[in-house]
């Protein structure tokens, strides 16, 4: 089965600024992929290219389509929330449902209504009368009621409080996700999505710096916290990053010699946030 | 086709002024007919009643048409700009609707749907007003407003004008769409600046006014293009009201210049330029997602 998203030397320049610099990555069906990077790394540009909202250089196939030239066809099978709170203020909730039901062949009205009822949002209110959180709920209800193969979310919980954020991710995993779907999500709240992701793509300065499944991260990377007297021995094992912590130094390794490290200090696995910071800040912090 | 209907509905949701403005104009006119004080007895008794009736009905229609022209201009300038400004374009583009369909549905809203709404509004208003006026001044007006032929002429005039203005003003409408799809702010200013600059530059460098002439002809030349200015003296009738004389056509049939309009090179050049500008607007819509 070919990959759902296949990018080869994907490049996007804005004048002299290179937002995407020959990025290569692929996304397989049935995965929940986090596209993670600092501000200005090219996350949004990559998503815009995948969704056909911007022209690009290089090769890009999404669900077998060239996004920019075939956006209309792509949008039958893919849906996205490219930013929070973009539903226009004049739009009524019931009209929004009618409209999507009218133009989208894969929209399931009953599903949208059930999701809205759950969020306690009634029909005839306009978007401008709703709070930011409620507006996001409406957009999510509209999007999650579409039977799409690919769902793309760009910072979907920005501006939501912790309860709404938790409710959103629960709904995403429990009500929406199944083996026929694929989700690509960007966020800078790495901790929040860490346990629902199956894969991560780290992006920095327009390039993909890590493309890995979470299982691979668990087996491939490790960190050890060592006291000062073991520091030189630990450094000899070629860590790619280190940082001081509570009088000790934590060193990060790729494909480490675990028995050796265990003799130097306390070894633990890396979580995505740790790895992200380590990968993107280079040597010592 | 279904998608286009939903897109037009969406325009009505967003732009409630499409039907609210004609509703307000109609309401005001009905109020004037109900409570206005017009001394019809002083109008010259020799005047042909048909001319009064025709003039009256035409004046109502002209008011609607004038307001509609202004509103449509504003609508065209706003329609591809507003959703980029509030970023809702990101929602509309997540639907399986091509940019071509979107742009054409907005053009059709401006050139066909909005005129049809104003046409319906004008018709309803004239019907109600004619009824009120006939009852209030039944003695002097004597059924002048109720001639089937008069009404038929009026309907035909509207439909003829909707069709011919849509074609004649197509390049202007398409140009406004280009500005709307392109500008990052101040759409009104950006719509005026390029033509103004061209006109002034031509005057400055070549001391000529070809561009100004072409633009002027396009903006103001519609009546000359679509109507005959003199179909023969017998078609005109002069009415004396107090000390004024009003000259009105007895019948409009002779005024339609259908053959002249459709055989004119200017009509077809305008359509061709309009089509090219529509392609531009679609391209811009595809590429410019945000401001």
Image: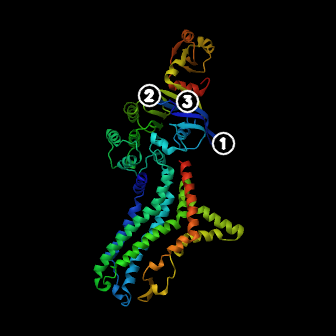
Q: Earlier in the sequence, mark 2 or mark 3?
A: 2
**Which chain contains the residue that carries disc 1?**
A
Residue sticking out furthest to the bottom? B46
Quick one: label 2, few (<14), some, or many (20+) residues within 10 Å? some
Residue B128 horizontal side relative to residue A106, left or right = left
Classify A273 as above or below A79.
above
Q: Secondary structure at mark 1?
A: loop
Classify A201 as above or below A56.
above
Residue A9's image quarter?
A: top right
- Find out whether the residues at labels 1 and 2 contact each other: C-beta distance under 8 Å: no
Are callouts 3 and 1 both on one chain?
A: yes
Q: Is residue A8 visible?
A: yes
Residue A196, numbered label: 2
**Which chain contains the residue that carries disc 3?**
A
Q: Earlier in the sequence, mark 3 or mark 1?
A: 1
Residue A2 location (% of width, % of height): 52, 31
Q: Secondary structure at mark 3?
A: strand
Q: Which residue is mark 3?
A: A202
Residue in the foreground of this view, choosing between A247 and A34: A34
**Which chain contains the residue that carries disc 2?**
A
Are callouts 2 and 3 both on one chain?
A: yes
Residue in the foreground of this view, choosing between A40 and B239: B239
Residue B290 horizontal side relative to residue A14, left or right = left
Residue A137's image quarter?
A: top left
Q: Which residue is mark 1?
A: A16
Residue A162 location (% of width, % of height): 40, 33
Residue sticking out furthest to the right? B205
Give the CA distance from mark 2 to mark 3.
16 Å
Residue in the foreground of this view, choosing between A117 and B256: B256
Residue B178's image quarter?
A: bottom right
Quick one: label 1, few (<14), some, or many (20+) residues within 10 Å? few
Residue B271 location (% of width, % of height): 55, 64
């Amino acid at each position: 089965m070919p990959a759902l998203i296949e990018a080869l030397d994907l490049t996007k320049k804005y004048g002299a600024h290179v937002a995407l610099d020959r990025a290569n990555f692929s996304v397989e069906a049935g995965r929940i992929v986090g596209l993670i990077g600092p501000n200005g790394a090219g996350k949004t540009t990559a998503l815009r290219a995948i969704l056909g909202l911007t022209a690009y250089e290089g090769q890009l196939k999404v669900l077998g389509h060239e996004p920019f030239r075939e956006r209309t066809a792509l949008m039958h099978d893919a849906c996205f929330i490219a930013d929070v709170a973009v539903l226009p203020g004049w739009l009524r909730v019931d009209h929004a449902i009618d409209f999507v039901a009218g133009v989208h062949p894969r929209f399931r009205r009953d599903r949208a209504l059930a999701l809205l009822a759950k969020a306690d949002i009634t029909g005839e209110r306009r978007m401008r009368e709703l709070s930011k959180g409620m507006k996001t709920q409406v957009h999510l209800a509209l999007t999650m009621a579409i039977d799409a193969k690919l769902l793309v979310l760009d910072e979907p919980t920005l501006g939501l409080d912790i309860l709404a954020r938790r409710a959103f991710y629960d709904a995403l995993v429990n009500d929406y996700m199944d083996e026929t779907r694929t989700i690509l999500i960007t966020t800078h709240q790495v901790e929040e999505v860490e346990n629902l992701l199956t894969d991560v793509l780290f992006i920095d300065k327009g390039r993909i710096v890590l493309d890995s499944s979470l299982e691979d991260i668990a087996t491939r990377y490790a960190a050890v916290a060592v006291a000062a007297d073991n520091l030189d021995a630990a450094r000899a094992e070629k860590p790619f990053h280190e940082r001081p912590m509570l009088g000790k130094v934590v060193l990060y390794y790729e494909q480490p010699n675990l028995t050796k490290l265990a003799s130097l200090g306390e070894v633990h696995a890396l979580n995505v946030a740790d790895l992200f910071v380590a990968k993107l800040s280079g040597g010592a912090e | 086709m279904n998608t286009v209907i939903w897109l037009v509905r969406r325009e009505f949701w967003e732009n409630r002024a499409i039907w609210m403005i004609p509703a307000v104009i109609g309401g005001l006119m009905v109020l004037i007919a109900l409570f206005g004080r017009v001394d019809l007895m002083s109008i010259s008794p020799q005047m042909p009643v048909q001319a009064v009736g025709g003039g009256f009905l035409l004046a109502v229609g002209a008011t609607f048409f004038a307001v509609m022209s202004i509103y449509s201009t504003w609508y065209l300038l706003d329609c591809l700009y507003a959703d980029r400004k509030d970023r809702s374009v990101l929602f509309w583009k997540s639907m399986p609707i091509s940019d071509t369909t979107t742009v054409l549905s907005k053009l059709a809203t401006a050139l066909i749907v909005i005129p049809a709404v104003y046409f319906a509004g004008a018709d309803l208003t004239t019907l109600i007003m004619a009824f009120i006026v006939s009852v209030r001044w039944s003695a002097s007006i004597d059924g002048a407003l109720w001639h089937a032929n008069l009404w038929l002429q009026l309907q035909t005039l509207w439909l003829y004008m909707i069709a011919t203005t849509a074609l004649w003003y197509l390049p202007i409408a398409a140009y406004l769409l280009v500005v709307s799809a392109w500008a990052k702010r101040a759409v009104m200013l950006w719509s005026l600046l390029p033509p103004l600059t061209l006109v002034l530059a031509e005057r400055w460098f070549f001391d000529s006014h070809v561009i100004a002439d072409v633009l002027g002809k396009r903006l103001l030349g519609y009546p000359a293009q679509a109507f005959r200015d003199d179909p023969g003296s017998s078609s005109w009738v002069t009415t004396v009201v107090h000390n004024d004389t009003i000259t009105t056509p007895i019948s409009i049939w002779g005024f339609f210049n259908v053959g002249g309009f459709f055989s004119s090179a200017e009509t077809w050049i305008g359509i061709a330029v309009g089509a090219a500008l529509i392609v531009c607007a679609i391209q811009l819509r595809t590429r410019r997602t945000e401001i």
